[in-house]
Amino acid sequence: MNRIKVKDNIFYIETAASCYVFGIWHGFAEHLYYGAKIPFSDVDVLKEKRSVILVNTLYPADDPTYSIDCKAFEFSLPGRGDSRSSSICLNCDKDPFDFVFDTYYLNSPSDQSPMPLPRKYDESLRVRFVDRIHEGVTLDLVYLVSYDDDVIARYSELYNGGNANIEILKFDSAQTDMLSANKKLVTFHGAWGREMSAVHEKLTAGKYTHGSYSGMSSAECNPLFFVADAGADEDDKEVYGFNLMYSASHEISAEVTPYGGLRILHGLQSENLRYTLRPQQKFTTPCSLSTYSGSGFNKASQNFHDFVRRSVVEQKDVPVMLNTWEAVYFGMDEKKMRTLADKAAQCGFECLVIDDGWFKGRNDDTTSLGDWYEDKKKFPSGLKDLSAYFAEKGLVTGIWIEPEMISEDSDLYREHPDYALKTEGLRKIVGRGQYVLDMTDKRVQRHVEDSVARLVEEYGAGYVKWDFNRRFAETDCTKGSGYFYDYVKGLYSVLARLNKRFPDLIIENCASGGGRFDLGMAYYTACGWASDNTNPLSRAEIQQGVSYGYPVSFTLCHVAASPGHQTMRTSELKDRINTAFFGVFGVQADITKMSDEETDMLKKEISDYKRCRKLLMSSDVYRIMTGEDGYRVTQTLSNDGKRGFLYLMREKFYTDTQLPVIKLKGLKKDSLYSISGQVAEVTASGETFMRAGLILPQNYQGAGRTDQTLMLTDSGTLLLEIKVKE
Ligand code: GLA
């Protein structure tokens, strides 16, 4: 099927519900339309735009009707009459660059990149521009279309076929110019332990910029963002979603223009980029993704979920795991691990992850990173032996590692101080007692690969938790932020080799929780740890934030102890379990200390979860309430519309208030559904549950109660099952 059509240098890219159109005029790539699908036969109409401004206008010498500042473009360079922010800025001996359209290719075999690209897509378009000033320098814009998911992936490639170095000062992955500016921007902010908090900004005059400048995709600003009609909500109005398949510093900017348009740029951190492209070298930007929904944020998120499941993450069955971090921290030994394994097996866990603290001399966080050998004092019989014990109990062995790091007090540092990233002359800056390794160095890449391989080959790991707990402080102006690009290129190459070498190995992506929770890492790992914060109240918000761009099947959710170690809040086990249900389920607490009653509850939960996890992993997710009046409500529904779950978090209890009526989403109008779980079964048609909604039983009001009274007080949760009655 032709998903990409071309007519008189107008390019039309079609997905199931949207289309993206641009064309070539005066050598420029002019953006014409992105939105709900319109027929290809109408594209000529899109050309006829008012574009003349009378004063202050700049236009090509042969066409005074073509006001450059008013037009929408696919990319822009400074000094060409477009006074908005540019997506590309280059320097070569101070000569200007002037790219003009040359040719295009459909489904070109050269659509490859050192950065991750979608594993699957339907068709591709490569549009080439040549620089009029430097012979041999070309700029390619590449578009990959995933028709069913309504996702278009884009990246750009600069080839230096000249004979002088080009300094790249800015090179965004995508420029999206919109003709209307009455929009809001939704970005995902936070910090450690409070990742993915959605922030809505009404765009007015001027430019809004946010991003990460720490070398990581970061907890401070996830690369995911949305641009939506000012009045858009979860189910209504136009929403454009964007994300990057990239794990280092990045930038998002939205600029309202004086002529009623909007320019959206995203890609690499531009500040201090300074990347040198030598003759005969190519620079490929990280891949940017966009999706369009005509019916609110839920649909845009579902598009991303489908796309990430099909085209980003290599789907693997992630086991139900017990993680030792909050159970024992550094105080682990062979005996404790065996006791945990015994209890884990009884409860139905499938994997035991030995977190930080297992390797030589590691008793706190100040030493030993880099020495990835078992600590003989803690494990006299060795990890191999322990792993065989786990296997007897039916448990996969998981091992934590932070392979991109080095402690000063380590054999690795004593032997190879040069592996650590440094800039001569700068004072040392330390984070969590450690330095980052220089992943651009091939020797370091080999060390990292060998260290992880040893966990699999010598210690029997089937699951590796790959952590990254420190940001960069050695990338001053001399290195430029372009260093981060080379860093992740090195990192990705190691991850790619490991995945090839050990196809069954499951890698978990972690960076002090969600510090690198992005689609670059998702490409190489099976699941991600979205936050260290496991308190249900915090977690309900974090998980809803995550749900805007990342599927349940990628998101690890753990039950931990009460009071929660990050918040010191107490919580009921039931509420922790309900909250962890909407992801890849696990526990990180000392289960040997649980009472019989708690153990039974956990066992039941694990068996319920196993029963429906396949379905849950592939279900659609709907956000029903996102904090309104202190409620967070999320629903899932299987692809056939027959089974789902409903989760409700009541953040704060007030006396004399009623629980909200919950209007379910996506059900089949005429089917009969039953809803049950923590409330007595209710049966009604899909239409009734969607329109009149689910009316929950009476909740406690502050005085008086019966056996039937629901007891949703502070941080109280409900988990209900939705089923079609056959
Ligand atoms: C980070 C991770 C935690 C744990 C510790 C171990 O903080 O996010 O889950 O693995 O490191 O040091």
Image (cartoon, rainbow, N blue to C red):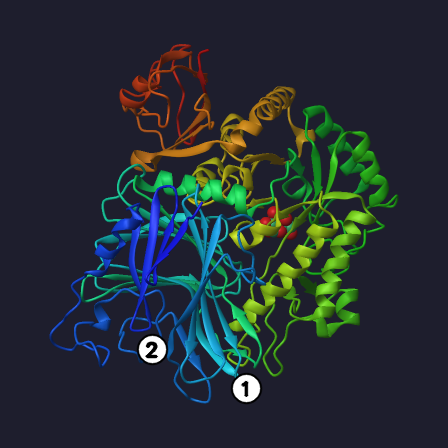
Q: CA distance from mark 1 to mark 2?
A: 23 Å
Per the image, the residue denoted by label 2 is 78
Quarter of the figure that contains the N terminus: top left
At mark 2, the secondary structure is loop
Residue at the right extreme of this rendering? 381
Disc 2 crowd rating (10 Å Cα; few below 14, some 14-19, many 20+) is: some
> Residue 451's x, y, as percent?
76, 57
Q: Image quarter for residue 461?
A: top right
Q: Is residue 678 above or below residue 354?
A: above
Q: Which mark is residue 163?
A: 1
Taking the image as drawn, is residue 664 in sight?
yes
Can you name the residue that lies furthest to the left here? Answer: 54
| In this rendering, the label closer to the viewer, 1 or 2 | 1
Return the x and y of residue 76 as percentages of the image width and height.
34, 71
Q: Secondary structure at mark 1?
A: loop
Q: Nearer the viewer, residue 716 or 481?
A: 481
What amino acid type is highlighted by mark number 1?
Answer: Asn
> Toward the viewer: 95 or 586?
95
